[in-house]
Image (cartoon, coloured by chain):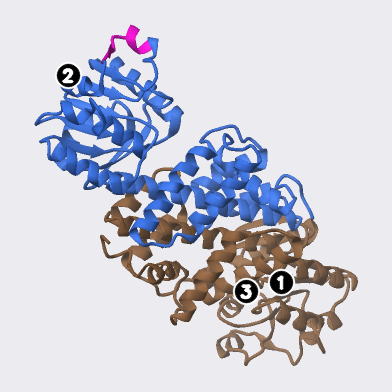
Chain colours: A blue, B brown
Amino acid sequence: MTDIGFIGLGVMGRPMAANLIAAGHKLFLRSAHSVPDDLLKAGGVVCATNKEVAQKADIIITMVPDTPQVEDVLFGKDGVASGLARGKVVVDMSSISPIATKDFAKRVNALGADYLDAPVSGGEVGAKAASLTIMVGGPEAAFDRVKPIFEKLGKNITLVGGNGDGQTTKVANQIIVALNIEAVAEALLFAAKAGADPAKVRQALMGGFASSRILEVHGERMIKRTFDPGFRIELHQKDLNLALQGAKTLGVSLPNTASAQQLFNVCAAHGGGAWDHSALVRALEIMADHEVAKKGG
Amino acid sequence: MTDIGFIGLGVMGRPMAANLIAAGHKLFLRSAHSVPDDLLKAGGVVCATNKEVAQKADIIITMVPDTPQVEDVLFGKDGVASGLARGKVVVDMSSISPIATKDFAKRVNALGADYLDAPVSGGEVGAKAASLTIMVGGPEAAFDRVKPIFEKLGKNITLVGGNGDGQTTKVANQIIVALNIEAVAEALLFAAKAGADPAKVRQALMGGFASSRILEVHGERMIKRTFDPGFRIELHQKDLNLALQGAKTLGVSLPNTASAQQLFNVCAAHGGGAWDHSALVRALEIMADHEVAKKGG
């Protein structure tokens, strides 16, 4: 069994590391905060530095909040880079900038090691159930080598292309999810304000061209007013920020992503940073002074 | 068999009327232009005025371009209203304003007749194949009476609620379809500009929360560059105009619908009024000076 390094043991990383230990791997662990007891009891080994993790493990997984944290873990003082050697693989499963990712991969490759960007979707529930969707960018040989490990973490695992393409796919996913939520929110609020029953409107639309996973799942949450996460607005804001920063760097205009981000800001202004992202409808409701659940103007 | 009046014999009305004649109904016909020969040969009867159609038929279907045309056909000189009597049903299958519809229904009810708003989706293909989706608003008894006729025109037939609710549902449908197209367009263009293969990105997203009928059908059109309608941008612009005018009247803010309408304007400015609505991606491409089909920045 491959020895695995795992850096970042938060809401996502902790259950993912637990699944790898349960599958029989030896894990070398490191966290910005303390390493959780359950991972130590299960046999995980704490390391003093990220460098030590890279020295002891063959495959080093990182699962940290954002681009600056990945950069620090990899290239900061006593970072992963200083412990790398030919034949090792860095696997960044955080959701970060596709553009920075290409740079990180080049710097890791220069040390003789491989790099895979492998962000996930599916959230804490998917991390615990080992049912994450994993979108991978990097060389095919490295992907083939890490695939058995991915299979202990998720189900829908795709090699999309070269380094950065995994992160790009994740950003594309988050753009569509946010904008499909916004679309359903506009449609149901319009329907409610016009006096129709949004539950019946949703039902009538489910079979046609307006059908989507978001209409099914998040549309129902808007009608039933169940805004417990799920996926928190503040996390989706981080992902849309990656899209908008990327758009600026690449020279692409993403008008509706920008607008959705502003609507999430409305939610945050009303104390909703930790609401489920389906609560984007609350922003439109506040602006219209009307709720989806309330029929008629 | 019920005698049916059919007013409006354009791209949609003509095949719908043909299907009703083929099913054995006697049809009384009226069109702003000349009545097509094939309908006359099949047994359709031309009327001199809309009033005459209403006098001779039990159920009067209207299928005309927009709100002013419906108002003129119903309440203009020698209009349907002047030929109505107790027990008749006006069935407006045009896509028009939900707000005006409620007024039209009241005026028809005052004459002792019933009113159903029953807009469709599925386009010319669905009209010919009798596979339209029909979204109905109005009294249940009138719906039950007309349902056998709807079943000769379409497949997915829903009574959503009272008068206006059929039109509201159609507007909600067109909002979601436009905004889901826009979402897929932003995501695929971002992916292409970031250097990923949009076809592979689309494939990776199909199973997850970003999945939608639009990602399947219109996403493929964007990648394959097949922008023959389908559904013309200029028709979708008319539908979004109903949404935006309705939003103003009702006091709802629909920021992304407004934005999508502006992007359709970009297409129209480049000669694309008759392109398929999936060509909304062309607007973003023109703005970014980059095509989805072309990888890399």
- Amino acid marked by disc 1: Asp
Q: Quadrant of residue A114?
A: top left
Q: How many marks?
A: 3
**In the rendered structure, which disc, 1 or 3, sits on the residue that comes first in sequence?**
3
Magenta span contains residue A46: yes
Asked whether residue A100 appears in the rendered view, the answer is yes
Residue nearest the viewer, comparing A16 with B35: A16
Image position of A283 (left or right of B77): left
Residues flagged by tags 3 and 2 on a common chain? no
Look at 77% across and 50% down and name the residue there.
A295
What's the distance in space between the residues labelled 3 and 2, CA to CA? Answer: 77 Å
Q: Circle 2 sits on which residue?
A: A56
User: Marks 1 and 2: same chain?
Assistant: no
* Residue indicated by mark 3: B20
Task: Judge depth for marks 1 and 2 and give the one in front.
Answer: 2
Quarter of the view holding residue B39: bottom right
Q: Residues within 10 Å of mark 3 (few under 14, many from 20)?
A: many
